[in-house]
Amino acid sequence: MATKGSSTAPKQQPVEQTVAGNRRVYHDYFVDETMEAGLVLTGTEVKSVRAGRVNLREAYARIDKGEAWLWNAHISPYDHGNRFNHEPQRTRKLLLHRNEIVRLNTAMKKKGYTLVPVRMYFKRNHAKVELGLARGKKLYDKRDSIAERDSKRDIERAMRSRTSGRDE
């Protein structure tokens, strides 16, 4: 007779395997909110995504007729695919709850808001996209963030040189 709990292994937290990121989003936009959305893919697309052959740089999401769609996300054709290989830049359906779609649609109607993919990853063997509700940055905002990043880097560099000088 098995003891209580010995027959079942403890459940592990779902492991997220990031496939592609879009760091340019944080340079071009102020990301106010992020959310997770499922992604409808074909068989060869899944294999290409698992291989990391994804580019989200020019991608964006749009809501049409109550459904969310991912536009301009480039998933390269699968190398070992056949004649049924997918189109690299086709629009792909995003899986969101209806109330999330309604909330995003009302937020996107505000001036300057857009929906951009931040990263693509696998969670429990399902392809997911992290979407960011973002406002576009102006040129002076970009300059401010670059100046702030440079000043932080200079401070860190000065602190490292001071601490390394004391140790000797």
Image (cartoon, rainbow, N blue to C red):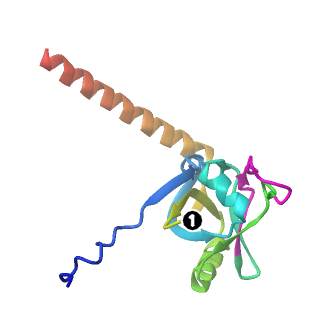
Q: Is residue 2 above or below residue 126?
A: below
- In magenta stretch: residue 74: yes
Q: Looking at the magenta stretch, what is its main secondary structure?
A: loop
Measuring from the top left, give residue 100's x and y in whole percent. 57, 80
Amino acid type assigned to the residue bearing label 1 in the image: Lys
Find disc 1 in the rendering and name its residue: 128
Q: Quadrant of the N terminus?
A: bottom left
Residue drawn where x is 46% and y is 60% of the image: 16
Farthest top residue?
A: 168
Q: Nearer the viewer, residue 95 or 26?
A: 95
Residue drawn where x is 52% and y is 69% of the image: 35
Residue drawn where x is 58% and y is 50% of the image: 22
Q: Nearer the viewer, residue 133 or 145?
A: 133
- In magenta stretch: residue 63: no
Measuring from the top left, give residue 90's x and y in whole percent. 79, 61
Q: Is residue 29 above or below residue 123?
A: above
Q: Is residue 121 above or below residue 138?
A: below
Looking at the rendering, which quadrant does residue 38 occupy?
A: bottom right
Q: Nearer the viewer, residue 12 or 151?
A: 12
Disc 1, SS: strand
